[in-house]
Amino acid sequence: MKKLLFILLFSTFATQAQEQPITPTVSPNPFERNQSITITVQGSQINESTWGVTGNALYLWAWMQDANGNYIADCPTNGTWTSTTETNRLTYNSGTDTYTKTFIPQDFYGNTVFGKMCFLVKAKDGSGDKKTNDNIFNILTKRTNIDIKDEEAKFDKERAASSSTGLLCCNPATAERTIYGRRRNAYATINSNAGLPSAPTRKANGLPGCDSAR
């Protein structure tokens, strides 16, 4: 009985031992769905012989999640777990000992509404856990006009409040249209006792009401 238990435990360990951890990079990062990106995996992080891989034949197995991490679907070119398609094969560069894959996320994944890009690296036949850990990267969501209008309304409310207390709310030379840019580059809580420009100077620079910065 003890011998049987040992064999089962050893078999389980051997299977798990085939999974190899990697820390891939994505360039550029952050990135949008319609932007060309390159995934890079250091060859030193994967022992191909552990999986019986020859000819540097490693593949991506990819899937999508929404912004909250809920599964959406697999990449349409995955193929099957025992036979990943050649479309998903990584390019090996012997000079740098790296594996790379360049693509546009929305084209490669066949989807324009997912929030997270997910993938692992595997042998063509991934049977027996011949794979790496899961890797998940957030997709940069482009802000919509509605988002900007909502935030501008909030900013306008804050601007009105600041003008009643003598605060300098923005600088037209650096202000951006969106609330993030305007807060980051322009929204200063400086009162009249902390170097606020004189009224004529502010008017010359278009500061009253801050409308020129919009």
Image (cartoon, rainbow, N blue to C red):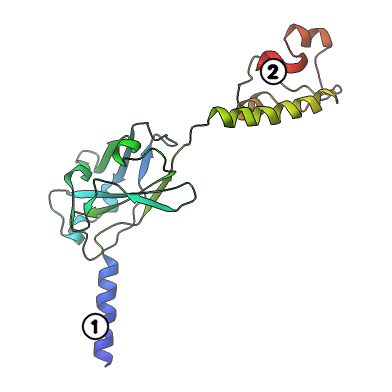
Residue at x-position 49% and y-position 32% = 142
Q: Tell me where residue 179 appears, x and y as whole percent.
A: 63, 28
Q: Is residue 77 above or below residue 197?
A: below
Marking on residue 171: 2
Q: Is residue 12 above or below residue 194?
A: below
Q: Tell me where residue 77 appears, x and y as whole percent.
A: 23, 45
Q: Is residue 36 above or below residue 109?
A: above
Decide if residue 192 is on the left or right side of residue 13: right
Residue 81 falls in which quadrant of the image? bottom left
User: Distance of mark 2 from mark 1, alpha carbons?
Assistant: 72 Å
Q: Residues within 10 Å of mark 2 (few under 14, many from 20)?
A: many
Decide if residue 26 is on the left or right side of residue 165: left
Disc 2 is placed on an element classified as loop
Q: Can residue 188 be seen by looking at this rendering?
A: no
Residue at x-position 41% and y-position 43% = 114
Observer-nearest residue: 53 or 135? 135
Disc 1 is placed on an element classified as helix
Tally of numbered tags? 2
Task: Residue under label 1, please give it.
Answer: 7
- Location of the N terminus (image quadrant): bottom left
In the picture as drawn, the residue positioned furthest to the bottom comes out as 1
Residue 139 falls in which quadrant of the image? top left
In the picture as drawn, the residue positioned furthest to the front comes out as 146
Residue type, label 2: Asn
Marking on residue 43: none
